[in-house]
Amino acid sequence: MIKQVNFLLAAVASNYMESFQGDILYDQVSIISTLDRRGEIELYVARQHFDTENRFVNAYKASIDEARKQARKDGWADWVILLRKVGEYSLTATFTKEREDGKEFPFERLYTWERIENEDKIIYKPKQ
């Protein structure tokens, strides 16, 4: 699972973000820890910004649901990525575009992940 998270974060940093990619490094350990503890975490990705729901939980002394709402209200993300733990060692990643003026996500760069659903949500899982 750690390898899958790291690959996804590297793809976000190198193929979507234009600056402040180092922000991902600050959150990498807490992302994995939150996945282990709660089974899911939201990531907020923009061209010049990266954050997780944990920042909003701590900053606003909020519940997870309140933190997620606040992150959207504050408009931090071009894309929201919901990582969910599936079983002991695997993940899914659901991508939701939050801003119309955000650039398109380079999904073709997620070559170790595969699209598993093609409806109103963009869902990927690591290839087996």
Image (cartoon, rainbow, N blue to C red):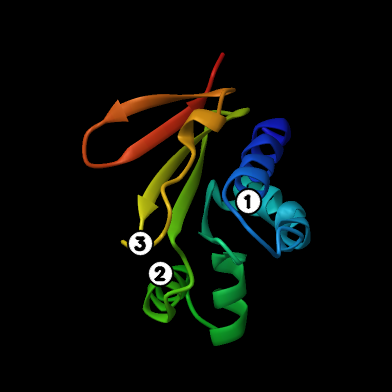
* SS for callout 1: helix
Q: Residue at x 68, y 63 (%)?
A: 19
Please give the name of the residue rendered at 57% of the width and 49% of the height, measured from the top-left corner: 16
Q: Which residue position is annotated with label 1?
A: 37
Label at residue 8: none
Do the numbered discs 3 and 2 sit on residues whose CB atoms are within 8 Å?
Answer: no
Answer above or below: position of 9 versus 70.
Answer: above
Q: Earlier in the sequence, mark 3 or mark 2?
A: 2
Position of 119 compared to 112: left or right? left
Q: Are marks 1 and 2 in contact (CB under 8 Å)?
A: no
> What distance separates the C-alpha of mark 3 from that of mark 1?
27 Å
**Is the residue under label 1 in contact with that under label 3 (CB below 8 Å)?**
no
Badge 1: few (under 14), some or many (20 or more) residues near its Cα, within 10 Å? few
Q: Residue furthest left?
A: 119
Q: CA distance from mark 3 to mark 2?
A: 17 Å
Between label 3 and label 1, give the one nearer the viewer: 3
Q: Quadrant of the N terminus?
A: top right
The quarter of the image holding the C terminus is top right
The kind of residue on which mark 3 rests is: Glu
Q: Quadrant of residue 4?
A: top right
Percent x, y for residue 63?
Answer: 47, 75
Q: Which residue is mark 2?
A: 65
- Tell me the kind of residue under disc 1: Arg
Between the C-alphas of marks 1 and 2, the distance is 16 Å
Residue at image position (40%, 26%) is: 115
- Label 3 sits on residue: 98
Which residue of the protein is positioned furthest toward the bottom in this rendering? 60
Left or right of 89, for residue 75: left
Query: Of label 3 and label 1, which has the lower sequence position?
Result: 1
The 10 Å Cα crowd at callout 3, few under 14, some 14 to 19, many 20 or more, is: some
Residue sitting at x 41%, y 46%: 95
